[in-house]
Amino acid sequence: MSEKKHFSPAEISFVNKTFDQAEKLAEKYFHLSPGDWKTHRYDVKTLAYLEEHEVHSRAFAHLCKYDYMKGESADNKENTHFYRICLQDGRILNAVERGSSFIKLMPLMLYIATHELIHVVRFNRGEGDFDAPVEEKIQEEENVHSITRNILQPIADNNLNLVLDCFSDQYHIGDIFDLTRN
């Protein structure tokens, strides 16, 4: 299987553009200003730059949370955290390759980017719990898939509609993700 494929430089540029677009969509949905992303800190890494624990064999993207402590006190107001969106290039490219007659990289990446940014916002706002038990994580995934569809539906063309259909409740694509394993 071609799971170890990496995005090309052109694809990485494209990924960056889809995250810019997803940010704007999330801003509109959650009533954020562009400056609010300073409190919803995140970065995006592709497979070539991931640490071993950031690689997830059963997802298109894996969200990791990192804490930064200033000094030794856990109560220090300067302590912060950020989320890393760990893109699994091989899984994404494999899905596009297998579904090349109907799944295109742009709409799939827009879905993934929007989905992951929704998690970042919800976790930062306390609307979801990053460290929740598995049952709650499954419910969070369902909630985020629903919000993602609601955000993307108004701008969906035929290609994006195909991706939305793949992640619809009817098909339960989320069942392929086993949240109990990495």
Image (cartoon, grey):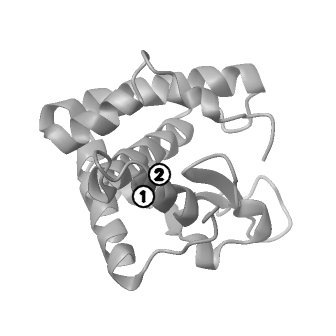
Say if mark 2 contacts mark 1, CB within 8 Å. yes
- SS class, disc 1: helix
**Left/right of residue 11 with respect to residue 1 in the rendered view:** left
Q: Which residue is mark 2?
A: 95
Q: Is residue 169 above or below residue 91?
A: above
Disc 2 residue crowd, few under 14, some 14–19, many 20+, Cα 10 Å: some
- Residue 164: mark: none
Question: How many numbered circles are shown?
Answer: 2
**Left/right of residue 60 with respect to residue 153 in the rendered view:** right
Q: Which residue is mark 1?
A: 97
Q: Is residue 79 above or below residue 148?
A: below
Please report the residue visible at 62 percent of the width from the left and 33 percent of the height from the top.
176
Q: Is residue 24 above or below residue 176?
A: below
Q: Residue 154's quadrant in the figure?
A: top left
Residue 138 in the image: state x and y as whole percent: 64, 24
Residue 156 visible (yes or no): no
Q: Is residue 114 above or below residue 90?
A: above
Please report the residue visible at 66 percent of the width from the left and 46 percent of the height from the top.
58
* Amino acid at pointer 1: Glu
Residue 137 in the image: state x and y as whole percent: 66, 28
Q: Residue 139's quadrant in the figure?
A: top right
Residue 58 visible (yes or no): yes
- SS class, disc 2: helix
Residue 79 in the image: state x and y as whole percent: 68, 61
* Amino acid at pointer 2: Ala
Considering the image in quadrants, where does the N terminus appear? bottom right
